[in-house]
Image (cartoon, rainbow, N blue to C red):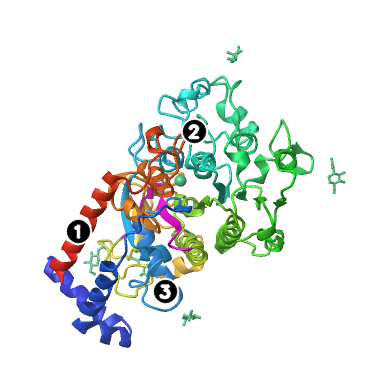
C-alpha cells in the first residue's frame, strides 16, 4: 500500500512541477548539493557565548507547526513559485527547539497560562496570568497575596536597567501581552467594566484591578517605553460619544500625566492612526502609546491600510525607539490574529497573518545585529488545523486535495478537528458531507474550512510548538523542553537576574558562560560535529 502511494505520488509530482523545477529536482545532484551546502553552513555556525544586549521575543499566537508548513507554501504560491521549498524568515534561524505547552491544570494551553510560562518562567492554571497555580481561575482574593505573584522578563529587564516594550495586533490587554505586565486571576478582566460583567458576583473583586489599569499604573507596565496594538476601549471612559468601557477614569490621560510627572524631560507620544505613527520621529521619542483600534486590530486582509499600521510597521517603529537605549532593551512582539483566524477556521487569514508575522521578524533581523541581539520566535500553543490528503506538488494549499473520498467528493487539504463550520448536512438518513470545491474556497477570504466536531469556536491544540532562535546564546533553545524554560533562557542570555537586587549568580542571576554552561556547550558542539562528520 505504502509503496504504491509513494510511487503514485512521485509520478504525480514529476508531472506537476514546472519544467525548470522538475528538471532540477529529477537530478540527484540537486538534492545532494543542496544538502551539503546546508551542512557546510551548519558546521560553520558559530556558537555565540557572549551576553545579549537586546532580546526580542516574537510570539505567533496559535502558530502551530502545521500553520508554519502551510504558511510557507502559501507564501511561495503568492509569488507563483514552489511554496513547498520556500521558507518563512525565521525558519532560517540557526537554532530550533520544541516547547511543551501544557499548563498546571490543563493538557491544552490557553494564551494566559501559556504567557505566564513563556514570560514569567512558571506554569500556572488555564485562564490566569502572572499568578501561581495556587490561584484558581477567577479567584480574586487568592490572587492578592504577593507570594502568589510571579514576575515577567519585562520586570527582570527593568531591574537590570534595560528598556522594555510590547507590540501586538490584539488588544494590548489581551492574554499574551498581559503576560508581560499583569497579575490577574482571570484573563477576561481587561477593563473595570469586564470585571463586573465577567465575575458575575462569583468572587469578591474589592482588592483586584483590571488589566488595563495594571498596565498604566503598576510596575512594570507603567515603565514600558513602547505599547502598541489595539484595545482603546479598555482605556477610555464610557460616554455618549465614546465606545470606551471604563467607569473609573480615562487611562490614556493617566498615562500622559504619569509620563509628564515622572519623566518631565522626556517626550511621550500617544498615537491612534498609522499616519500619526509614521509621522512620529522615533529617534526623538522616549515613550509611545499607540492604540490603533477600539478592540483587536483588523486582519491584514481586511484592514484599512490608511488608518491602521501593520505589525511590521509597528515592530519597525518599536525597534527604532528602543535602539537608542544604552543598556539595551527587551521587546515582546505578538502576531495575535493567527489564533483568532484559526478559531473561525479561516485558514487563509491565519496563513496571511503568519506571513505578516514573518515580515515583522525579517525587519527585526535586518535592523539588529546577531552579535548583540537575541531573537526568539515561538508560539504559545497549537491549533487543530491539519494538512491532509495527497495533494500534488504545487497544488493550491488553500484548495481541495485532488483525490476523492469514499463519498465521491473532494476535500480540502486544510481542515480542522473542530470548529464552527458544519461539514455535514441532512438528517439522520440523508446525512452527507458538504461538497466543497476550489470555486467555493476562492470566493471569499474568510471561507470557513471544514471541521469534524461542531463547536462555536475552534479550539487550541495540545501539540508541542516550535522555537527558533538567533543571536547570543541562541543554542540554549535547542531540544525539547517545558515552555517555562524560554524566559529563563532569554534572561540567561542577557545576563539579567530573576530577582530585583543583584545580577550576580548567588542571587538568582543566570549568567551565560558559567562552567556548567560551557560543558553543555562543548558537548553540544562535539555532538553536532560528530553528526555532521558521520553523515558526510
Ligand atoms: C501569479 O500568477 C497569477 C495568475 O497567473 C497572477 O495574477 C499574479 O499576478 C502572479 N503573481 C506574481 C507575484 O507573479
Ligand atoms: C470583600 O473583601 C473586602 C476586603 O477583603 C471586605 O472588606 C468585604 O467585606 C468583602 N465583601 C464581601 C461582600 O464579602
Ligand atoms: C455627541 O456628538 C454629537 C454629534 O457630534 C453632539 O451633537 C453631542 O453634543 C455630543 N455629545 C456629547 C455628550 O459630547
Ligand atoms: C462512488 O462512485 C463509485 C463509482 O462510480 C460508485 O460505485 C459508488 O457507489 C459511489 N459511492 C457513493 C457513496 O456514491
Ligand atoms: C461537487 O461539486 C462539483 C462542482 O460543482 C460537482 O462537479 C460535483 O459533481 C459535486 N459532487 C457531488 C458528489 O455532488
Ligand atoms: Zn486562542
Q: Mark 3, mark 1: which one is toward the viewer?
A: 1
Pick the quarter of the image with the N terminus.
bottom left
What residue is shown at x 35% (from left), y 43% (from top)? Answer: 485
Kind of element beneath mark 3: helix
Q: Is residue 192 magenta?
A: no
- What stretch of residues is rendered in magenta? 369-387
Q: Position of residue 491 (x, y in %)?
A: 42, 45
Residue 34 visible to the viewer? yes
Q: CA distance from mark 3 to mark 2?
A: 52 Å
Most foreground residue, 305 or 100? 100
* Residue underneath mark 2: 501
Decide if residue 415 is on the left or right side of residue 244.
Answer: left
Using the image, tell me which numbered label, if any, was put on residue 63. none
* Residue underneath mark 1: 526
Decide if residue 457 is on the left or right side of residue 227.
Answer: left
Q: Earlier in the sequence, mark 3 or mark 1?
A: 3
Decide if residue 183 is on the left or right side of residue 1.
Answer: right
Kind of element beneath mark 1: helix
Q: Position of residue 261 (x, y in %)?
A: 74, 38
* Residue underneath mark 3: 77
136, above or below 446, in the image = above
Mark 1 nearby-residue class (10 Å; few <14, some 14–19, many ≥20)? few
Q: Earlier in the sequence, mark 2 or mark 1?
A: 2
Decide if residue 534 is on the left or right side of residue 367.
Answer: left
What residue is shown at x 59% (from left), y 46% (from top)? Answer: 171
Q: Mark 3, mark 2: which one is toward the viewer?
A: 2
126, above or below 384, in the image = above
Q: Position of residue 162 (x, y in %)?
A: 54, 46
Q: How many marks?
A: 3
| Whether label 3 touches label 2, CB < 8 Å | no
Q: CA distance from mark 2 to mark 1?
A: 37 Å
Amino acid at each position: 500500500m505504502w509503496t504504491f502511494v509513494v510511487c503514485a505520488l512521485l509520478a504525480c509530482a514529476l508531472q506537476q512541477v514546472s519544467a525548470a523545477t522538475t528538471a532540477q529536482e529529477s537530478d540527484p545532484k540537486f538534492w545532494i548539493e543542496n544538502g551539503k551546502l546546508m551542512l557546510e553552513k551548519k558546521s560553520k555556525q558559530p556558537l555565540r557565548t557572549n551576553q545579549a544586549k537586546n532580546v526580542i521575543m516574537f510570539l505567533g499566537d496559535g502558530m502551530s507547526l502545521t500553520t508554519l508548513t502551510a504558511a510557507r507554501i502559501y507564501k511561495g504560491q503568492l509569488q507563483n513559485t514552489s511554496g513547498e521549498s520556500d521558507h518563512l524568515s525565521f525558519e532560517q534561524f540557526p537554532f530550533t527547539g520544541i516547547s511543551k505547552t501544557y499548563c498546571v491544570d490543563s493538557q491544552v494551553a490557553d494564551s494566559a497560562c501559556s504567557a505566564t510560562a513563556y514570560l514569567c518562567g512558571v506554569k500556572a492554571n488555564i485562564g490566569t496570568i502572572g499568578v501561581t497555580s495556587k490561584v484558581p481561575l477567577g479567584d480574586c482574593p487568592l490572587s492578592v497575596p504577593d507570594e502568589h505573584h510571579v514576575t515577567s522578563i519585562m520586570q527582570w529587564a527593568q531591574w537590570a536597567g534595560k528598556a522594555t516594550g510590547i507590540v501586538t495586533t490584539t488588544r494590548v490587554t489581551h492574554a499574551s501581552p498581559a503576560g508581560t505586565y499583569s497579575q490577574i486571576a482571570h484573563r477576561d478582566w481587561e477593563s473595570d467594566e469586564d470585571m463586573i460583567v465577567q465575575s458575575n458576583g462569583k468572587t469578591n473583586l474589592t482588592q483586584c484591578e483590571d488589566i488595563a489599569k495594571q498596565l498604566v499604573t503598576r510596575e512594570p507596565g507603567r515603565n514600558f517605553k513602547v505599547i502598541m496594538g489595539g484595545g482603546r476601549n479598555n482605556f477610555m471612559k464610557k460616554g455618549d460619544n465614546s465606545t470606551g468601557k471604563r467607569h473609573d477614569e480615562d487611562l490614556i490621560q493617566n498615562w500622559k500625566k504619569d509620563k509628564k510627572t515622572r519623566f518631565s524631560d522626556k517626550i511621550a507620544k500617544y498615537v491612534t492612526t498609522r499616519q500619526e505613527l509614521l509621522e512620529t520621529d522615533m529617534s526623538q521619542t522616549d515613550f509611545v502609546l499607540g492604540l490603533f483600534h477600539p478592540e483587536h486590530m483588523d486582519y491584514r486582509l481586511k484592514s484599512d491600510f490608511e488608518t491602521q499600521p501593520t505589525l511590521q510597521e509597528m515592530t519597525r517603529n518599536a525597534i527604532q525607539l528602543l535602539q537608542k537605549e544604552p543598556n539595551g532593551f527587551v521587546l515582546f512582539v505578538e502576531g495575535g490574529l493567527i489564533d483568532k483566524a484559526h478559531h473561525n477556521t479561516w485558514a487563509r487569514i491565519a496563513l496571511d497573518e503568519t506571513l505578516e508575522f514573518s515580515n515583522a521578524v525579517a525587519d527585526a533581523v535586518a535592523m539588529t545585529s546577531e552579535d548583540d541581539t537575541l531573537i526568539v520566535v515561538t508560539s504559545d500553543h497549537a491549533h487543530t488545523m491539519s494538512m491532509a490528503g495527497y495533494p500534488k506538488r504545487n497544488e493550491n494549499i488553500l484548495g481541495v486535495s485532488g483525490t476523492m473520498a469514499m463519498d465521491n467528493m473532494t476535500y480540502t487539504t486544510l481542515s480542522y478537528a473542530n470548529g464552527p463550520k458544519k461539514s455535514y448536512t441532512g438528517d439522520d438518513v440523508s446525512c452527507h458531507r458538504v461538497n466543497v470545491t476550489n470555486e467555493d474556497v476562492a470566493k471569499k477570504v474568510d471561507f470557513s474550512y471544514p471541521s469534524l466536531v461542531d463547536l462555536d469556536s475552534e479550539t487550541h491544540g495540545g501539540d508541542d510548538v516550535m522555537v527558533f532562535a538567533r543571536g547570543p546564546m541562541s543554542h540554549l533553545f535547542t531540544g525539547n523542553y517545558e515552555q517555562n524554560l524560554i524566559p529563563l533562557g532569554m534572561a540567561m542570555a542577557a545576563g539579567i537576574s530573576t530577582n530585583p537586587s543583584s545580577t550576580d549568580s548567588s542571587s538568582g542571576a543566570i549568567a551565560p558562560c558559567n562552567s556548567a554552561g560551557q560543558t553543555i556547550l562543548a558537548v553540544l558542539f562535539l555532538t553536532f560535529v560528530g553528526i555532521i562528520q558521520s553523515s558526510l
